[in-house]
Amino acid sequence: MRAQGGLPAGAVVIEREAIPASAHTERELVLWMISSEKHDRGSYSEKNPYMCPERTRGSYFSGPTRISLVDTGSGKTINTVVLRSSVDEADTFDVPYRILADWPYLVPGTPKDAEGKPHLLALRDLNGDGLALETAFFEAIACMGLPSTLIGSSPRQDKVIQYQVELKLRSPSGR
């Protein structure tokens, strides 16, 4: 899908998601890329299982990736966040277009252990503020650890933001 309204020439829109009117009217998040390359891993099967990095990218587009907050009334871009690889902070990110359902992305209408189109901008309350305005992106580099980033709309700032996330590990006893 080609870009429109407020995005640069050559931008390809991957997905759009309206911000709930209860949080802010006339706003949407737009996930888009520039000069992306398509990487099709082939269909998942017992003979073609996912390796660890494929769990977060499946078949994917790779290239400069952006998430913008757009004013749907005027069509203008309010602001944009760059989504970068955590490996070397290069201006690229792998965005799945077909992936196994159930982990880590939501893949509506697709049974577990089958592939489908992920809903990348599925807005949920991931920061605990009671507003379903955030989504997460993942980048498995190996079989240990899972670099992730949390992106969301801030109604107070009227911007899309990348949240700072701090992981705190607790012992099984809860301390």
Image (spheres, rainbow, N blue to C red):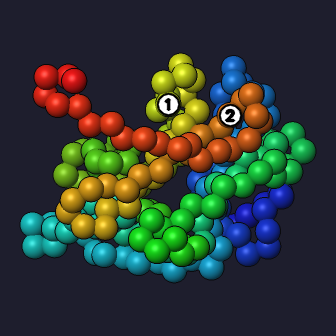
Tell whether 117 sits left or right of 164: left
Secondary structure beneath label 1:
loop
Q: Looking at the rendered structure, which numbered label has been put on residue 55?
A: none
Instruction: Say above or below: 93 vs 6.
Output: below
Q: Closest to the observer: 150 or 60?
A: 150
> Please, is residue 156 above or below residue 39 in the view?
above
The amino acid type of the residue labelled 2 equals: Ser
**Residue drawn at x 68%, y 34% as measured from the top left:** 154
- Tell which circle, 1 or 2, labels the residue nearer the N-terminal end: 1
Above or below, 137 against 47 in this view is above
The percent position of residue 11, horizontal first and vertical second, equals: 71, 69
Question: Left or right of 158: which side holds 59?
Answer: left
Q: Which mark is residue 127?
A: 1
Label 1 Cα neighbours within 10 Å, binned few <14 / some 14-19 / many ≥20: some
Q: Which residue is mark 2?
A: 154
Residue that extends furthest to the left in the rendered view of this protein: 46
> At which x and y percent is residue 124?
49, 32
Write down the quadrant of residue 174 in the picture: top left
Residue type indicated by callout 1: Asn
Q: Residues within 10 Å of mark 2 (few under 14, many from 20)?
A: some
Residue at the extreme front of the image, as rendered:
175
Rendered location of residue 33, percent (x, y): 62, 68
Q: Considering the numbered disc 2 on the image, is that residue within a helix, a strand or a loop?
A: strand
Image location of residue 24, percent across then percent down? 75, 27
Please state if 161 lies on the left or on the right of 98 as rendered.
right
Label 1 with label 2: CB-CB less than 8 Å: no
- Is residue 134 in view from this perspective? yes
